[in-house]
Each structure stands twice: as structure tokens, then as C-alpha cells.
């Protein structure tokens, strides 16, 4: 019997933009057919995706396939967390951090094969003030960089990587420092920091594993607070991260917990969620939703 899925594809995602919808539909239909997957392939507008996903989660389907980058998959996770429907991920973004941490292959043909095999596990999702994220969240320098990069892309037509370089230089010139009260579980510490990074489970800091996660089901947030107050100190921290020698130390505090609260002396705060920025109102209340999401993974991960 053919497997009947619903597939939602973000045609504007990183690697999908190179094809028009008809070509992409034909390619996916061919790939699905090879794996005996019968799927209703749809291309909703990104703003419609949360609504159509919530409608689809009540369907009698063996899974919902979503193609896109981390932002698209974050939207899918928010809609499907807590349901019985597994999520099938097609990595169509630029970086695809979530799919890499799941151990998914980057080729669409192979990723479809993982869905067809139906090996399912439960993974954690995290949440801040009601906003779900699957990888990480941050406040400080990074969300300012993202907002400036997007402005340069839209207003001046710069390419993404060119805009990112310009935005990084401009952000470093401003070097925003924030006074923060960080409470993890029942311990509260005051900081003056350029960036706080909250991971959904632990991120590797060693060479060869930097920026990746070995587990997505530990049920814990990992809060990283940069304790540097100068540009030189921050650049040193970044360079140590790039060479895989970043550790919890006097200039980087790492705390683990099931929930955290971050308070700032501002009424509106840019917060990065899986590379996208939302403006949230402090206090920022982070919680882990343990094993809330069902996903298709390779057999070795199941």
C-alpha cells in the first residue's frame, strides 16, 4: 500500500529558490514515487503555513512532510508538537542545522527514503514566551546582526552573505551590551553581556563537534552567557569557538536547566529563534518541552 502523506513545501527556501514550483513539484513527485510515498504536495505561502499545518494535524495521515530551512521546520514543530503525527523533514534550506543534528542526509532522494522507512523518535522542542524553537535562541549581538542584514537585503538589494558581512561590521561598531538578570531554575545572576545563547539541548564546543548536538532528547536548556564587555574580548571568544577551544570559563558561563528567565531593563527585545528574529517583551521565560515532537530519522538514530 502506498503511504499517504501531506507535503508542505516552502518554495522560497534556500535551495528551493533555484527551481520554479512546477519543476519542484515534478521532482518531488518522482522522488516520492520511487519510495512508494503517495503525497499531496502543496506550496502554501509562508504566512499561511502555521494555519494549514494546524488544520493538517487533525488529519488521518501517517506523517506530515515539510520542506524548507530551519525557520520553516520551526513553524512545523510549533504546529505538530504534542500531536501524534510525525514530521518528515526535507532539507531545502541553506544551512539545515536541525536536519543535520537529526542525522538526515542532505540529498532529497535519501531524505525521502528516511521518511519511507518510518523510523520515528521523539525529540525536545524549546519555547520562549510562547514561541517555539528547535535549535537555539539568542539575545544581544546576533539578532541585531540579523535585523540589519535583512534591512540591507531589502533596502539595498545586497546578496545575503554580502549583507551579513556589512551587518556584522556595523553591529560590532555599536557593540550592544545589555544588563541582564538571568535565572536558571532557582539561581539568579546579574550579567552585563553582549550575547546570551540558549540551546535546545547541549551544543558541542570541541573541534569537529562545534555547533552540533549529539542528543535532541536530553530534556534540558543550555544557557551560554558571554561575560566579556569589550570588542576584543568578544572577538577572542568567537575565534576560540571557530577553532573548537571554547569552554565554560571566566568569560563564558554555561548553565543547564529545564527553565530559565531573562529580565532586561527594556520593554521590547529582539530575540533570535532559529535564525529568525521576533520582538518579545521581557521577562523572557524559556522552557523545554521534553520529547514533544515526533520525527522520522535514520534507523541508526531510532
Image (cartoon, rainbow, N blue to C red):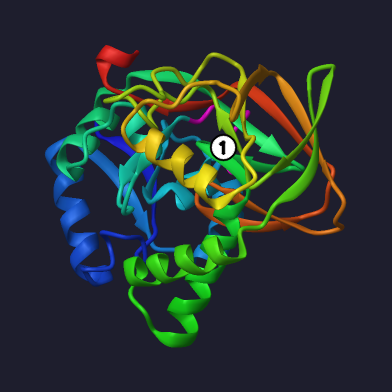
Depth check: give the residue in front, 183 or 31. 183
Rendering quarter of residue 50: bottom right
Instruction: Examine the rendered structure and indicate whether residue 48 appears above or below residue 52.
Output: below
User: Residue at coordinates 53% horizontally, 61% vertically from top-left?
Assistant: 172
Residues drawn in magenta: 79-85
Above or below: residue 266 compared with residue 207: below
What is the quadrant of the N terminus in the image? top left
Q: Is residue 139 magenta?
A: no
Judging depth in this view, the residue of 93 and 109 nearest the camera is 93
Q: Can residue 83 be spotted in the picture?
A: no
Q: Nearer the viewer, residue 130 or 231?
A: 231
Specify few, some or many for label 1: CA neighbours under 10 Å numbering under 14, 14-19, or 20 or more: many
Percent position of residue 43, x then y = 39, 63
Position above or below: 94 against 105: below
Side of 192 where 122 appears, left or right: left
Residue at image point 17% right, 35% down: 110
> Residue pushed farthest bottom?
156
Q: Looking at the picture, how far across and down is residue 57, in whole percent?
A: 56, 40
Q: Is residue 142 above or below residue 168?
A: above
Query: How many circles with numbers are drawn on the protein?
Result: 1
The answer to if 83 sits in the magenta stretch is yes
The percent position of residue 214, horizontal first and vertical second, equals 39, 18
Residue occupying the point 43% across, 47% down? 70
Magenta stretch mostly in which secondary structure?
A: loop
Q: Mark yes or no: residue 219 visible.
A: yes
| Residue 22: x %, y % from top left | 23, 70
Q: Quadrant of the C terminus?
A: top left
- Of helix, strand and loop, which one carries label 1? helix
| Residue position for label 1 | 80
Residue drawn at point x = 62 percent, y = 25 percent: 253
Amino acid at each position: 500500500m502506498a503511504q499517504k502523506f501531506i507535503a508542505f513545501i516552502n518554495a522560497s527556501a534556500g535551495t528551493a529558490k533555484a527551481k520554479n514550483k512546477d519543476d519542484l513539484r515534478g521532482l518531488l513527485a518522482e522522488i516520492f514515487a520511487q519510495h512508494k510515498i503517495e503525497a499531496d504536495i502543496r506550496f502554501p505561502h509562508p504566512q499561511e503555513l502555521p494555519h494549514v499545518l494546524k488544520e493538517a494535524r487533525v488529519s488521518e495521515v501517517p506523517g506530515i512532510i515539510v520542506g524548507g530551512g530551519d525557520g520553516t521546520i520551526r513553524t512545523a514543530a510549533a504546529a505538530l508538537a504534542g500531536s501524534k503525527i510525525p514530521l518528515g523533514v526535507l532539507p531545502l534550506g541553506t544551512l539545515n542545522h536541525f536536519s543535520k543534528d537529526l542525522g538526515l542526509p542532505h540529498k532529497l532522494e535519501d531524505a525521502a527514503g528516511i521518511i519511507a522507512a518510518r523510523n520515528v523518535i521523539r525529540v525536545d522542542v524549546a519555547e520562549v514566551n510562547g514561541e517555539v524553537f528547535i535549535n537555539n535562541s539568542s539575545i544581544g549581538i546576533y539578532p541585531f546582526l540579523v535585523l540589519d542584514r535583512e534591512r540591507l537585503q531589502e533596502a539595498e538589494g545586497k546578496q545575503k552573505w554580502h549583507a551579513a558581512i556589512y551587518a556584522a561590521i556595523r553591529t560590532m561598531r555599536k557593540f550592544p551590551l545589555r544588563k541582564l538578570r538571568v535565572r536558571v531554575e532557582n539561581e539568579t545572576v546579574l550579567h552585563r553581556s553582549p550575547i546570551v545563547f540558549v540551546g535546545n539541548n547541549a551544543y558541542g564546543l570541541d573541534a569537529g563537534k562545534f555547533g552540533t548536538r549529539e542528543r535532541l532528547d536530553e530534556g534540558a536548556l543550555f544557557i551560554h552567557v558571554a561575560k566579556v564587555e569589550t570588542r576584543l574580548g568578544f572577538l577572542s571568544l568567537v575565534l576560540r569557538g571557530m577553532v573548537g577551544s571554547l569552554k565554560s570559563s571566566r568569560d563564558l558561563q554555561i548553565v543547564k536547566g529545564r527553565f530559565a528567565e531573562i529580565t532586561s531593563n527594556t520593554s521590547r527585545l529582539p530575540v533570535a529563534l532559529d535564525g529568525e528574529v521576533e520582538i518579545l517583551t521581557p521577562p523572557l521565560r524559556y522552557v523545554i518541552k521534553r520529547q514533544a515532537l515526533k520525527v522520522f530519522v535514520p534507523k541508526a538514530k531510532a
